[in-house]
Image: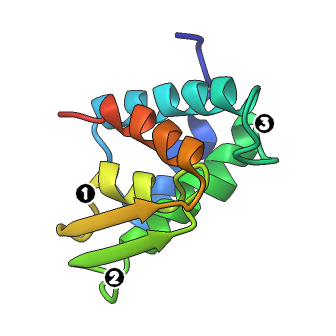
Amino acid sequence: MKEYNLEGFERGLFELGITLSEQQKTQFLQYYELLVEWNSFMNLTAITEFDQVITKHFLDSLLFASQPEVAGKMVDVGAGAGFPGIGGTHSRCGNGSRFSGNPTENRVSGGGSCTAGFTE
């Protein structure tokens, strides 16, 4: 895996009051690489620059999933590239059940591939 500057990610996590393990951070980086790879042949997102994905996808997803109003169950319909569902599920913010879905078959398959590596 490529080396990434995580200062912005870690600063954003700190500002949001969210703590991730080193393994979870690594898994987000793996998700980023898989997202860019899948995006090369499937239009998942227009945002693929690392710093922008951190801010506009990962941190936004974590912020949403960490809110007390969302704790418990969350449905992410039209998930596309998996945001905010995958980030929230992976971080386990707000313990509970989540479902992410997209009416486009290939995007659902892609999201399944992304979440397959999110184990602890």
Residue 6 horizontal/vertical position (percent): 57, 33
Point out the image quarter for the C terminus: top left
Q: Earlier in the sequence, mark 3 or mark 2?
A: 3
Quadrant for residue 106, please give it: top right
Which residue corresponds to mark 2? Answer: 70
Quadrant for residue 48, please give it: top right
Type of the residue with mark 1: Arg
Q: Earlier in the sequence, mark 1 or mark 3?
A: 3
In this rendering, position of residue 38 left or right of residue 105: right
Quadrant for residue 72, please give it: bottom left
In this rendering, position of residue 83 left or right of residue 101: right
Type of the residue with mark 2: Val
In this rendering, position of residue 79 left or right of residue 40: left
Tag 1 near tag 3, CB within 8 Å: no
Which residue corresponds to mark 1? Answer: 92
Say if residue 22 shows up in the picture: no
From this view, report whether residue 85 is shown above or below residue 31. Answer: below
